[in-house]
Amino acid sequence: MSKIEKLVGLLKRLNSGEKIEEVEKDAENFLSQINATDLSIAEQQLMDNGMEAEDLRGLCVIHMQMLEGEVEKMTAELEEGHPVAIMVQEHGVLLETLEELESLNATLQQNILTPKLQSELLRIVRILTGAELHHQREEQALFPILEQRGISGPPTVMRLEHESLRPKKHGLEVLATNALEIEHEEFKKQLAELSRYIIFNLRDHIFKENHILYPSAIEIITEREVWAKISEQCDKIGYTPYTKGK
Ligand SMILES: [Fe+2]
Ligand SMILES: [Fe+2]
Protein backbone atom coordinates (compact mmCIF):
# COMPACT_ATOMS: atom_id res chain seq x y z
CA MET A 1 0.00 0.00 0.00
CA SER A 2 1.37 3.40 -0.91
CA LYS A 3 1.84 6.13 1.66
CA ILE A 4 -1.03 8.11 0.13
CA GLU A 5 -3.41 5.11 0.08
CA LYS A 6 -2.62 4.48 3.72
CA LEU A 7 -3.25 8.10 4.56
CA VAL A 8 -6.56 8.14 2.65
CA GLY A 9 -7.61 5.06 4.66
CA LEU A 10 -6.75 6.79 7.94
CA LEU A 11 -8.63 9.93 6.96
CA LYS A 12 -11.70 7.89 6.07
CA ARG A 13 -11.63 6.28 9.51
CA LEU A 14 -11.28 9.67 11.22
CA ASN A 15 -14.13 11.07 9.15
CA SER A 16 -16.34 8.19 10.16
CA GLY A 17 -15.97 9.38 13.76
CA GLU A 18 -13.13 7.24 15.14
CA LYS A 19 -10.95 8.94 17.70
CA ILE A 20 -7.58 10.18 16.56
CA GLU A 21 -5.81 8.22 19.34
CA GLU A 22 -7.27 4.92 18.11
CA VAL A 23 -6.42 5.61 14.51
CA GLU A 24 -2.97 6.75 15.48
CA LYS A 25 -2.32 3.58 17.46
CA ASP A 26 -2.80 1.60 14.26
CA ALA A 27 -0.81 4.07 12.28
CA GLU A 28 2.12 3.71 14.69
CA ASN A 29 4.62 6.36 13.78
CA PHE A 30 3.15 6.79 10.35
CA LEU A 31 1.84 10.27 11.01
CA SER A 32 5.27 11.62 11.81
CA GLN A 33 6.55 10.49 8.41
CA ILE A 34 3.98 12.29 6.31
CA ASN A 35 4.32 15.86 5.20
CA ALA A 36 2.00 18.62 4.06
CA THR A 37 2.24 17.55 0.40
CA ASP A 38 1.16 13.97 1.22
CA LEU A 39 -1.79 15.42 3.08
CA SER A 40 -2.85 17.64 0.18
CA ILE A 41 -2.66 14.71 -2.27
CA ALA A 42 -4.72 12.53 0.06
CA GLU A 43 -7.21 15.36 0.56
CA GLN A 44 -7.53 15.80 -3.22
CA GLN A 45 -8.15 12.05 -3.67
CA LEU A 46 -10.94 12.10 -1.10
CA MET A 47 -12.51 15.16 -2.68
CA ASP A 48 -12.26 13.59 -6.17
CA ASN A 49 -14.22 10.70 -4.68
CA GLY A 50 -17.03 13.07 -3.74
CA MET A 51 -16.14 14.03 -0.19
CA GLU A 52 -17.22 17.51 0.88
CA ALA A 53 -14.57 19.87 2.23
CA GLU A 54 -16.39 20.04 5.57
CA ASP A 55 -16.17 16.28 5.91
CA LEU A 56 -12.42 16.47 5.87
CA ARG A 57 -12.31 17.17 9.57
CA GLY A 58 -9.86 14.34 10.07
CA LEU A 59 -7.41 16.07 7.87
CA CYS A 60 -7.65 19.15 10.00
CA VAL A 61 -6.98 17.12 13.16
CA ILE A 62 -3.95 15.42 11.62
CA HIS A 63 -2.72 18.73 10.31
CA MET A 64 -2.96 20.22 13.77
CA GLN A 65 -1.14 17.32 15.35
CA MET A 66 1.63 17.57 12.80
CA LEU A 67 2.05 21.26 13.40
CA GLU A 68 1.53 21.21 17.15
CA GLY A 69 5.29 21.11 17.64
CA GLU A 70 5.62 24.40 15.79
CA VAL A 71 3.15 26.14 18.07
CA GLU A 72 4.97 24.77 21.10
CA LYS A 73 8.26 26.06 19.73
CA MET A 74 6.71 29.49 19.21
CA THR A 75 5.28 29.74 22.73
CA ALA A 76 8.45 28.35 24.34
CA GLU A 77 10.26 31.46 23.17
CA LEU A 78 7.73 33.80 24.73
CA GLU A 79 7.86 35.22 28.22
CA GLU A 80 5.39 33.93 30.76
CA GLY A 81 2.12 35.80 30.58
CA HIS A 82 2.79 37.00 27.01
CA PRO A 83 -0.57 37.83 25.36
CA VAL A 84 0.00 35.30 22.56
CA ALA A 85 1.08 32.53 24.96
CA ILE A 86 -2.19 33.06 26.84
CA MET A 87 -4.23 32.97 23.64
CA VAL A 88 -2.54 29.73 22.55
CA GLN A 89 -3.31 28.17 25.95
CA GLU A 90 -6.97 29.16 25.61
CA HIS A 91 -7.03 27.68 22.11
CA GLY A 92 -5.87 24.41 23.65
CA VAL A 93 -8.87 24.37 25.99
CA LEU A 94 -11.22 25.25 23.11
CA LEU A 95 -9.84 22.45 20.92
CA GLU A 96 -10.35 19.92 23.72
CA THR A 97 -13.88 21.25 24.20
CA LEU A 98 -14.64 20.83 20.50
CA GLU A 99 -13.58 17.20 20.76
CA GLU A 100 -15.94 16.79 23.71
CA LEU A 101 -18.75 18.40 21.74
CA GLU A 102 -18.07 16.08 18.84
CA SER A 103 -18.32 12.98 20.99
CA LEU A 104 -21.35 14.26 22.93
CA ASN A 105 -23.15 15.00 19.66
CA ALA A 106 -22.38 11.43 18.52
CA THR A 107 -23.75 10.07 21.84
CA LEU A 108 -26.91 12.17 21.59
CA GLN A 109 -27.58 11.09 18.01
CA GLN A 110 -27.85 7.51 19.39
CA ASN A 111 -29.31 8.04 22.85
CA ILE A 112 -32.17 9.72 24.66
CA LEU A 113 -31.38 13.07 26.21
CA THR A 114 -31.09 12.84 29.99
CA PRO A 115 -30.68 15.76 32.43
CA LYS A 116 -27.09 14.55 32.95
CA LEU A 117 -26.31 14.76 29.24
CA GLN A 118 -28.02 18.12 29.09
CA SER A 119 -25.82 19.53 31.83
CA GLU A 120 -22.76 18.12 30.06
CA LEU A 121 -23.88 19.94 26.91
CA LEU A 122 -24.41 23.15 28.88
CA ARG A 123 -20.93 22.87 30.42
CA ILE A 124 -19.41 22.58 26.93
CA VAL A 125 -21.49 25.47 25.58
CA ARG A 126 -20.40 27.74 28.45
CA ILE A 127 -16.74 27.13 27.65
CA LEU A 128 -17.40 28.06 24.03
CA THR A 129 -19.42 31.20 24.80
CA GLY A 130 -16.88 32.06 27.52
CA ALA A 131 -14.30 32.47 24.75
CA GLU A 132 -15.87 35.83 23.92
CA LEU A 133 -13.25 37.66 26.01
CA HIS A 134 -10.53 35.80 24.13
CA HIS A 135 -11.96 37.05 20.80
CA GLN A 136 -12.32 40.57 22.17
CA ARG A 137 -8.67 40.63 23.24
CA GLU A 138 -7.69 39.64 19.72
CA GLU A 139 -10.00 42.20 18.12
CA GLN A 140 -9.27 45.12 20.41
CA ALA A 141 -5.72 44.62 21.64
CA LEU A 142 -3.85 42.62 18.98
CA PHE A 143 -5.45 43.18 15.56
CA PRO A 144 -5.34 47.02 15.64
CA ILE A 145 -1.53 46.94 16.04
CA LEU A 146 -1.20 44.56 13.09
CA GLU A 147 -3.49 46.79 11.04
CA GLN A 148 -1.44 49.87 11.92
CA ARG A 149 1.55 48.02 10.51
CA GLY A 150 -0.09 47.21 7.22
CA ILE A 151 -1.36 43.69 7.97
CA SER A 152 -5.06 44.08 7.32
CA GLY A 153 -6.19 40.93 5.47
CA PRO A 154 -5.83 38.26 8.18
CA PRO A 155 -7.38 40.39 10.99
CA THR A 156 -10.37 41.16 8.72
CA VAL A 157 -10.92 37.47 7.98
CA MET A 158 -10.53 36.57 11.68
CA ARG A 159 -13.07 39.25 12.69
CA LEU A 160 -15.57 37.94 10.14
CA GLU A 161 -15.10 34.42 11.49
CA HIS A 162 -15.73 35.62 15.06
CA GLU A 163 -18.90 37.31 13.77
CA SER A 164 -20.19 34.23 11.99
CA LEU A 165 -19.47 31.96 14.97
CA ARG A 166 -21.30 34.16 17.51
CA PRO A 167 -24.92 33.42 16.42
CA LYS A 168 -24.12 29.69 16.12
CA LYS A 169 -22.72 29.53 19.65
CA HIS A 170 -25.72 31.50 20.87
CA GLY A 171 -28.02 29.10 18.99
CA LEU A 172 -26.32 26.13 20.65
CA GLU A 173 -26.74 27.78 24.05
CA VAL A 174 -30.48 28.32 23.47
CA LEU A 175 -30.84 24.75 22.20
CA ALA A 176 -28.97 23.30 25.19
CA THR A 177 -31.00 25.38 27.65
CA ASN A 178 -34.35 24.29 26.20
CA ALA A 179 -33.20 20.79 25.23
CA LEU A 180 -35.64 18.85 27.40
CA GLU A 181 -38.66 20.74 26.03
CA ILE A 182 -37.79 20.15 22.36
CA GLU A 183 -38.99 17.12 20.42
CA HIS A 184 -36.04 14.68 20.33
CA GLU A 185 -35.71 14.30 16.55
CA GLU A 186 -35.78 18.07 16.11
CA PHE A 187 -33.26 18.49 18.94
CA LYS A 188 -30.90 15.96 17.32
CA LYS A 189 -31.14 17.66 13.96
CA GLN A 190 -30.40 21.11 15.33
CA LEU A 191 -27.63 19.81 17.57
CA ALA A 192 -25.94 18.06 14.65
CA GLU A 193 -26.13 21.14 12.43
CA LEU A 194 -24.86 23.61 15.02
CA SER A 195 -22.13 21.31 16.35
CA ARG A 196 -20.90 20.55 12.87
CA TYR A 197 -20.66 24.22 11.98
CA ILE A 198 -18.95 25.26 15.21
CA ILE A 199 -16.52 22.32 15.30
CA PHE A 200 -15.37 22.74 11.73
CA ASN A 201 -15.16 26.52 11.70
CA LEU A 202 -13.68 27.12 15.13
CA ARG A 203 -11.00 24.47 14.56
CA ASP A 204 -10.15 26.03 11.25
CA HIS A 205 -10.09 29.50 12.82
CA ILE A 206 -7.76 28.41 15.64
CA PHE A 207 -5.54 26.67 13.15
CA LYS A 208 -5.12 29.86 11.12
CA GLU A 209 -4.42 31.98 14.19
CA ASN A 210 -1.92 29.53 15.70
CA HIS A 211 -0.06 28.96 12.47
CA ILE A 212 -0.38 32.17 10.52
CA LEU A 213 -1.65 35.15 12.49
CA TYR A 214 0.18 34.71 15.81
CA PRO A 215 3.56 33.83 14.25
CA SER A 216 3.24 36.91 11.98
CA ALA A 217 2.39 39.09 14.97
CA ILE A 218 5.46 37.87 16.85
CA GLU A 219 7.62 38.50 13.83
CA ILE A 220 6.22 41.97 13.14
CA ILE A 221 5.86 43.33 16.67
CA THR A 222 9.41 43.24 17.97
CA GLU A 223 9.26 45.98 20.60
CA ARG A 224 8.82 44.82 24.19
CA GLU A 225 7.01 48.00 25.12
CA VAL A 226 4.37 47.43 22.43
CA TRP A 227 3.71 43.94 23.78
CA ALA A 228 3.53 45.41 27.27
CA LYS A 229 0.82 47.81 26.06
CA ILE A 230 -1.07 44.96 24.37
CA SER A 231 -0.82 42.99 27.60
CA GLU A 232 -2.13 45.93 29.62
CA GLN A 233 -5.10 46.26 27.30
CA CYS A 234 -5.75 42.51 27.49
CA ASP A 235 -5.86 42.82 31.28
CA LYS A 236 -8.49 45.54 30.96
CA ILE A 237 -10.65 43.40 28.66
CA GLY A 238 -10.35 40.35 30.87
CA TYR A 239 -9.81 36.60 30.72
CA THR A 240 -11.88 33.43 30.54
CA PRO A 241 -12.54 31.20 33.58
CA TYR A 242 -10.11 28.66 32.06
CA THR A 243 -7.25 31.05 31.28
CA LYS A 244 -3.97 30.01 32.88
CA GLY A 245 -1.00 32.26 33.56
CA LYS A 246 -3.02 35.35 34.54
FE1 LIG B 1 -9.87 34.57 16.83
FE1 LIG C 1 -8.18 32.94 18.92
Image (cartoon, rainbow, N blue to C red):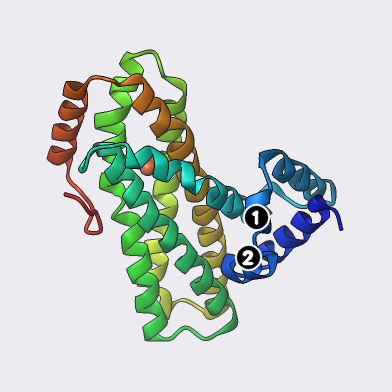
Relative horizontal placement of residue 226, taking residue 122 as reference (left or right): left
Task: Say left or right for 12 vs 136.
Answer: right
Q: Which residue is mark 1?
A: 31
In this orientation, does residue 164 appear? no
The CB of the residue at mark 2 lies under 8 Å from ligand 2: no
For label 2, the residue is 24
Q: Secondary structure at mark 1?
A: helix
Proximity of marks 2 and 1: CB atoms separated by less than 8 Å: yes
CA separation in Å, label 2 and label 1: 7 Å
- The local secondary structure at tag 2 comes to helix
The kind of residue tagged 1 is: Leu
Question: What x and y, as percent, mark residue 71?
Answer: 43, 42
- The amino acid type found where label 2 is placed reads Glu
Residue nearer the viewer, 20 or 2: 2
Residue 130, given in percent of the width and then of the height, sits at 28, 55
The residue that appears at 29% across and 48% down in the rendered structure is: 132
